[in-house]
């Protein structure tokens, strides 16, 4: 869970600058209070009344220093006007650099820092997190959180806090001049702020609910974009539009009838109390002025600074409202940033690539391996498999039999509930995860492509490879058969998710990309299941040229892909049902034989 402390810690790296910039902005707000006081004193001079004692002493000392014997009244006016000039005109070009410059420098630096931290967080979270949260939900939460932090800090540090310092300074000015009025002022001001904070706390809870609803809406929008082909294929555009309209209308009603209405009621109450309080202060100082108990200058000073103080209530309330509206999204951003890291966090250390440059023979042993995504159901139950170096082993079985889960465990996406996986006799837990994974390579059923060139995608896992090695891998994977037909050859842009390539082309690029890694263990996860016969044949020929060059694991539904494997492991309901080569398993007349017969006849299983 995140809290208000997380919002403060967001600026921890620049806290010294934060304190200095806020202090400087507050000091300028206090300096502004001198102007109405001096104007009050100037009115006293003009009306023939005395100025305050300490100002009289200051004027006399200045006259002695500069050796001026001019009229005292004139000299007093000159001194007071000169001070006003210093704190207004001279101060003007200085304030933006001490205030505005540092406030925005801090917030832009933190935005840069946290944008980097977000990428680190995304890369280091366990795979299970992405099974439960889609990209739209994550991106929306991050974007709103960082954006609201960026715009909130200059308003809070540059305006809200300095205004509060200004109000506190006004209280002390009034306290020096009229104690009773000062007590009434601070009482009314405190009451207004407390009521505002209590009301805002209730509204923040509504904002948190709204933020969750908005996140769900954005998540669905992201899914629509990702699955737009499916939406159009099933002609469900109108259904999706109606669903999103309902969500947006529900959000609108919450904003208008609960949240915005609450802010308007708060502003109405606050403005009424402010005007009433200011009017009472006006009467309180007017009466003694009429009775000549205080000077006109003091009357003007007290009423002016009181008006200045109460005038700050509205911008303070507005800034508080803005903060309240943004609070929920910032808190939810920090909830994301506070998520526990997976073991994958170590992959962010580039030094591990150098320090842990492993080289394996490729002997894999699964000993009593058990795993389940839920405690009450095992996907894999006490699996024992031995894969010798350079051996090609195929895993076959019905959907849900545990084939892909074994690969996830081998990649350490998840930890087994029981048992262990040994590589060259060492538990894979003992290897640095980054160095370990760099010795494995996988070709998925759907090969992920980045929106870049063919060459960029080929060298993604090994950017330091030379062109000769790339071409060698492309020859083995039979990429060279179509690369010359592409408009820009290796520099052809493949488009988002590789949309400009066919399924077979992407699969062959996936194989080449895996070979460029020069892995000790190569895995094909349903690499041909979604291809046509001709494309499947091309991929099978590419795979066949790799067999025996390294430890190879094949996961397949189509048994034509696994005929030449050294060993075929048949899985059924998370357990090993049969082990042998193609001919041996056919001869046993078991599960493998039945699956083979169904596929030969064209039936599904």
Image: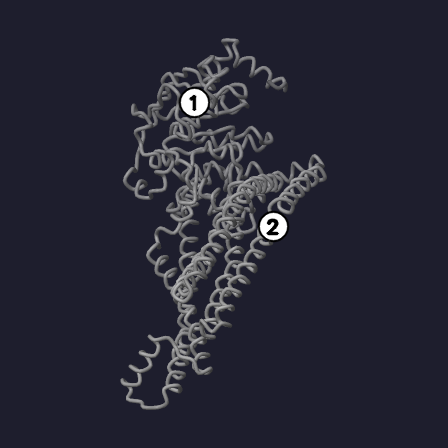
Residue 95: % across, % down: 41, 69
Q: Quadrant of residue 545?
A: top left
> Residue at position x 31%, y 85% from top?
63
Q: Earlier in the sequence, mark 2 or mark 1?
A: 2
From the viewer's side, name the closer residue of 89 and 244. Answer: 89
Residue 604 in percent (x, y) is at: 62, 19
Q: Residues within 10 Å of mark 1 (few under 14, many from 20)?
A: many
Res 453 seen here: no
Task: Give the residue displayed 49% in from the left and 35% down from the top.
Answer: 130
Is 446 rendered above or below residue 404? below
Total number of numbered discs in the rendering = 2
Q: Position of residue 441 (x, y in %)?
A: 42, 34
Cα separation, mark 2 vs mark 1, equals 71 Å
* Disc 1 element: strand
Q: Is residue 426 visible?
A: yes
Query: Is residue 578 rendered to the left or right of residue 251?
Result: left
Instruction: Give the residue number, with chain letter if any, for mark 1.
Output: 393
User: For the C terminus, which image quadrant?
Assistant: top right
Residue 541 spot, x, y in % from top left: 50, 31
Q: Residue at x 40, y 69 (%)?
A: 31
Q: Which quadrant does the N terminus fall into?
A: top left
Q: Nearer the viewer, residue 597 or 276?
A: 276
User: What's the colour scheme?
Assistant: one colour
Q: Say the numbered circle drawn on residue 533.
A: none
508 sits left or right of 55 in the view: right
Mark 2 highlights which residue? 265
Q: Nearer the viewer, residue 283 or 480?
A: 283
């Amino acid at each position: 869970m995140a809290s208000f402390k997380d919002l403060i810690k967001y600026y921890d790296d620049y806290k010294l600058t934060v304190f200095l910039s806020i202090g400087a902005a507050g000091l300028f707000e206090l300096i502004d209070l001198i102007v109405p006081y001096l104007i009050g004193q100037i009115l006293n001079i003009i009306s023939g009344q005395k100025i305050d004692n300490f100002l009289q002493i200051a004027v006399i000392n200045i006259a002695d220093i500069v050796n001026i014997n001019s009229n005292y009244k004139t000299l007093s006016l000159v001194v007071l006007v000169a001070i006003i000039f210093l704190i207004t005109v001279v101060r003007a070009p200085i304030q933006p650099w001490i205030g505005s410059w540092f406030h925005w420098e801090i917030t832009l630096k933190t935005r840069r820092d946290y944008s980097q931290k977000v990428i680190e967080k995304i890369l280091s979270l366990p795979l299970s997190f992405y099974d439960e949260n889609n990209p739209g939900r994550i991106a929306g939460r991050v974007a709103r959180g960082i954006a609201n932090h960026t715009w909130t800090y200059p308003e809070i540090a540059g305006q809200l806090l300095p205004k509060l310092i200004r109000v506190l300074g006004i209280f002390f000015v009034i306290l020096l001049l009229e104690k009773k009025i000062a007590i009434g002022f601070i009482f009314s001001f405190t009451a207004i702020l407390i009521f505002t904070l209590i009301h805002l706390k209730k509204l923040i809870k509504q904002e948190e609910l709204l933020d969750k609803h908005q996140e769900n809406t954005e998540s669905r929008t992201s899914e629509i974009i990702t699955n737009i082909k499916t939406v159009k294929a099933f002609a469900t555009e109108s259904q999706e539009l109606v669903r999103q309209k309902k969500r947006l209308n529900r959000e609108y009603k919450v904003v208008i009838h609960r949240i915005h209405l609450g802010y308007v009621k708060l502003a109405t109450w606050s403005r009424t109390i402010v005007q009433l309080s200011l009017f009472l202060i006006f009467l309180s100082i007017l009466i003694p002025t009429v009775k000549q108990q205080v000077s006109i200058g003091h009357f003007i000073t007290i009423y002016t600074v009181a008006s200045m103080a109460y005038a700050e209530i509205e911008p303070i309330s507005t800034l508080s409202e803005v903060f309240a509206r943004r609070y929920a999204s910032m808190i939810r951003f920090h909830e994301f940033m506070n998520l526990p890291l997976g073991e994958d966090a170590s992959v962010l250390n580039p030094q591990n690539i150098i320090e842990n440059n492993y080289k394996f023979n490729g002997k894999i042993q699964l000993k009593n391996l058990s795993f389940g995504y839920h405690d009450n159901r095992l996907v894999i139950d006490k699996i024992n498999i031995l894969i010798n170096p350079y051996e090609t082993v195929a895993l076959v079985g019905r959907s849900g039999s545990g084939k892909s889960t074994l690969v996830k465990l081998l990649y350490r996406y998840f930890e087994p509930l029981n048992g262990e996986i040994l590589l060259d006799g060492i538990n894979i837990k003992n290897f640095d995860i980054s160095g370990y994974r760099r010795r494995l390579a996988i070709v998925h059923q759907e090969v992920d492509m980045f929106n870049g060139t063919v060459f960029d995608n080929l060298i993604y896992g090994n950017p330091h490879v030379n062109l000769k090695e790339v071409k060698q891998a492309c020859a083995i994977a039979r990429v060279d058969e179509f690369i010359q037909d592409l408009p820009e050859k290796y520099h052809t842009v493949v488009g988002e998710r590789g949309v400009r390539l066919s399924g077979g082309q992407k699969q062959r690029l996936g194989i080449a990309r895996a070979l460029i890694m020069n892995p000790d263990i190569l895995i094909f996860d349903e690499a041909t299941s979604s291809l046509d016969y001709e494309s499947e044949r091309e991929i099978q020929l590419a795979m066949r040229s790799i067999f025996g060059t390294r430890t190879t694991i094949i996961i397949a539904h189509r048994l034509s892909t696994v005929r030449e494997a050294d060993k075929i492991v048949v899985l059924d309901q998370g357990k090993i049902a049969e082990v042998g080569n193609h001919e041996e398993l056919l001869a046993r007349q078991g599960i493998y034989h039945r699956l083979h017969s169904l596929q030969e006849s064209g039936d599904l299983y």
